[in-house]
Amino acid sequence: MSNHRERLGYLLKHAYLAYTALIEQVLAPYGIEGREFAVLLVFDDAVPLSQQEAARRLTIDRTTMVAFVDALESKRLVERRPDPADRRRNIVSLTDDGRRLLAEATTAADEAERRFLAPLGPDSTRFTADLARIIEAFEGH
Amino acid sequence: MSNHRERLGYLLKHAYLAYTALIEQVLAPYGIEGREFAVLLVFDDAVPLSQQEAARRLTIDRTTMVAFVDALESKRLVERRPDPADRRRNIVSLTDDGRRLLAEATTAADEAERRFLAPLGPDSTRFTADLARIIEAFEGH
DNA sequence: TTTGATAGTCAGTTATACTGACGATCAGCA
DNA sequence: TGCTGATCGTCAGTATAACTGACTATCAAA
């Protein structure tokens, strides 16, 4: 009975849905969505990134990235400027506001992750490591 | 650095994407998609289900279920008939073809799950149990 | 300096699932 | 028996997300 609830696909999908619902709720007070948070994280890097590099890291399309940067720029959280070394590219960097907001949002997201993993007890890091292992194995297709 | 790759959201999303890609590939020879497989699984139940009950179990909308049953019915894998006890409802049941195909597809999906979890070594059931635990905890919102 | 490739952008398309409304049907009650 | 409100399946329309393809500007290499 209730066979489908034990299938891996069901479990992965609903774990992801549950996490998404939680993180959206937690980030809402900061005026950003979960995906915008991810984009901010990518651009908050030691080396400045072009839009396309950032898109590749998140495994989204470069045309999709345009809209994200548009949105974040209109919120004054990031700014585009042409890469002097290659003027086809945009260097996207966080503004001071962006960095401030990202710091606060990260704290909130960390707390949400802790709550999400709480049912697993003390060794929830094992679960996270398992996820990473699976993804890594799959990337070598 | 490469901060975002350690975030739980990234891990959950990409684990789900990897699994989806694998299962779609494995089910393609049987002429069904991953979501259709899930729908078949739900309707292959001891007690006959209405469309709405099945939709609730998969956490999809009842209007979405209509299209799935349409597709599966046109492939002669399921059939609708009005519930004699409540003629507002459709009882959806698998045809003989549907049962046969589901049996084969299930074998293939099981094998895919095994391959997917292989990187975790012998105790991959722990990982699955963790997923179930998280979902269950979240359902009590 | 010409050729082929790449980055960002935009318009249009596709995929997916939703909202709202409708007819048919049911359960409860006067 | 005949109303009243709710439910089921269905459909049309809508919203959202992400894509494809084309375009311009720019670069790298011969």
Image (spheres, coloured by chain):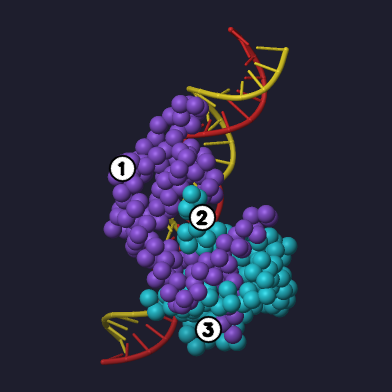
Chain colours: A cyan, B purple, C yellow, D red
* Badge number at residue A5: 2
Q: Are marks 1 and 2 in contact (CB under 8 Å)?
A: no
Q: Position of residue A70 (x, y in %)?
A: 58, 67
Q: CA distance from mark 1 to mark 2?
A: 23 Å
Q: Position of residue B101 (x, y in %)?
A: 31, 51
The chain holding disc 2 is A
Of circles 1 and 3, the one toward us is: 1
Residue A20 versus residue A11: which sits nearer the camera?
A11
Q: Which residue: 57% across, 62% down?
A: B132
Q: Secondary structure at mark 1?
A: helix
* Badge number at residue B96: 1
Q: Residues within 10 Å of mark 3 (few under 14, many from 20)?
A: some
B104 relative to B78, above or below:
below
Q: Residue type at mark 2? A: Arg
**Labels 1 and 2 share a subunit:** no
Q: Which residue: 34% across, 56% down?
A: B105
Residue B135 versus residue C19: which sits nearer the camera?
B135
Q: Is residue A6 left or right of residue D24?
A: right
Q: CA distance from mark 1 to mark 3?
A: 63 Å
Q: Residue type at mark 3? A: Asp
Q: CA distance from mark 3 to mark 2?
A: 50 Å
* Badge number at residue B54: none
Residue B75 seen: no
Q: Is residue B13 left or right of residue B139?
A: left
Q: Is residue A29 left or right of residue A54?
A: right
Q: Residue type at mark 1? A: Asp
Q: Are marks 1 and 3 in contact (CB under 8 Å)?
A: no
Q: Which residue is mark 3?
A: A83
Residue B32 versus residue A77: which sits nearer the camera?
B32
Q: Secondary structure at mark 3?
A: strand
The chain holding disc 3 is A
